[in-house]
Each structure stands twice: as C-alpha cells, then as structure tokens.
Amino acid sequence: MPTYFCFIERDIIGTTHMEALDADSEDEARAEAEALLQTHASGIAAHILLDDVRIATLRRLAPDRG
C-alpha cells in the first residue's frame, strides 16, 4: 500500500505541519490534503508526497475582494 503524506506550507514563521494521509489512491490523498489545508488558517498550500516524492501541490484560492 502506498504511503501518502501532506506537508502544509504556511504564510507565517513557526512550526511546520506534516502528517500521513489515510489514502489508498492519489485522488483520495488530494481530497484529504484539501480538507487538511482548510483547517489551517495560515496554510497557503498543501504538498502531497508519495513516500519521498512530491506528486502534487494544492494552493488555497485567494479570497474574493470584490
């Protein structure tokens, strides 16, 4: 079984956040990483790793200032 991890990139200095994802596929890993990114107010991106290789980066959308 593959091991997916999510690294949350933040826009402030401090402790980084990385955790294993409970995913069996890249699609599941992306969904979990997106949900995890939404739980971090200072998060600007979620980097998804498969073992030690980055396979995707999800970025938080900028708020609509209209």
Image (cartoon, helix red, strand yellow):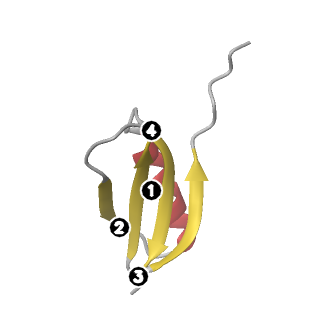
Residue with the most extreme front position = 13
Residue with the most extreme bottom position = 1
Residue contact between numbered discs 1 and 2, judged by CB atoms under 8 Å:
yes
**For mark 1, does the 10 Å Cα neighbourhood hold few (<14), some (14 to 19), or many (20 or more) residues?**
some
Residue contact between numbered discs 4 and 3, judged by CB atoms under 8 Å:
no
Q: Which residue is mark 1?
A: 32
**Which image quarter: residue 40?**
top left
Residue 17: horizontal and vertical position, in percent?
31, 53
Q: Which mark is residue 24?
A: none
Which comes before the other along the chain, label 1 or label 2? 2
Which comes before the other along the chain, label 4 or label 3? 4
Q: Residue at x 44, y 50 (%)?
A: 9
Circle 2 or circle 4, nearest the eye: 4
Which comes before the other along the chain, label 2 or label 4? 4
Q: Which residue is mark 2?
A: 22
Inter-mark Cα distance, 2 to 4? 26 Å
Residue with the most extreme left position = 15
Which comes before the other along the chain, label 3 or label 2? 2
